[in-house]
Image (cartoon, rainbow, N blue to C red):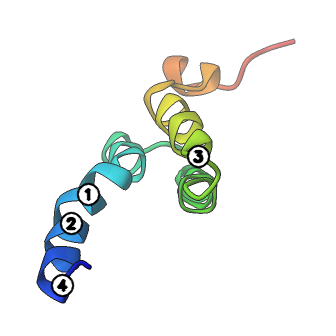
Amino acid sequence: MLTLNEILIGLAVSLPFLLLPIFIAFWRGHPKKGRLALLNILGLPVFGIGWVLALIWAVTVPDSAESGTEPRN
């Protein structure tokens, strides 16, 4: 059985990695960082699929953010 010390060390090591998409989104100023954080946290229990989707979403730049203006129709 794991001791409390081992559990705390495991959390301290894994938590920054698990929250990596949130850190990237805030660092890059992603326009939907709140929704991205919600997807990351709620998606972790589902085999990490939410984490992978949040990571992809965090590193992609929306089209309107690249040019700095809204797209024209």
Asked if marks 4 and 1 touch (Cβ < 8 Å), the reply is no
| The quarter of the displayed image where residue 9 is located | bottom left
Task: Give the labeled residue for mark 3.
Answer: 47
Task: Give the labeled residue for mark 1.
Answer: 14
Coordinates of residue 4 in the picture (x, y in percent): 19, 87
- Asked whether, in this view, residue 68 is left or right of residue 25, the answer is right
Task: Give the labeled residue for mark 4.
Answer: 3
Helix, strand or loop at disc 2? helix
What kind of residue is marked 2? Gly
Separation of residues labelled 4 and 1 (CA atoms): 17 Å
Mark closest to the chain's N terminus, 1 or 3? 1
As rendered, which of 70 and 39 lies closer to the eye?
A: 39
Separation of residues labelled 1 and 3 (CA atoms): 15 Å
As rendered, which of 18 and 37 lies closer to the eye?
A: 18
Q: Is residue 6 above or below residue 72?
A: below
Question: In the rendering, which numbered label is found on residue 51?
Answer: none
Helix, strand or loop at disc 1? helix
Task: Give the labeled residue for mark 2.
Answer: 10
What kind of residue is marked 4? Thr
- Asked whether, in this view, residue 54 is left or right of residue 24, the answer is right
The mark closer to the camera, 4 or 1, is 4
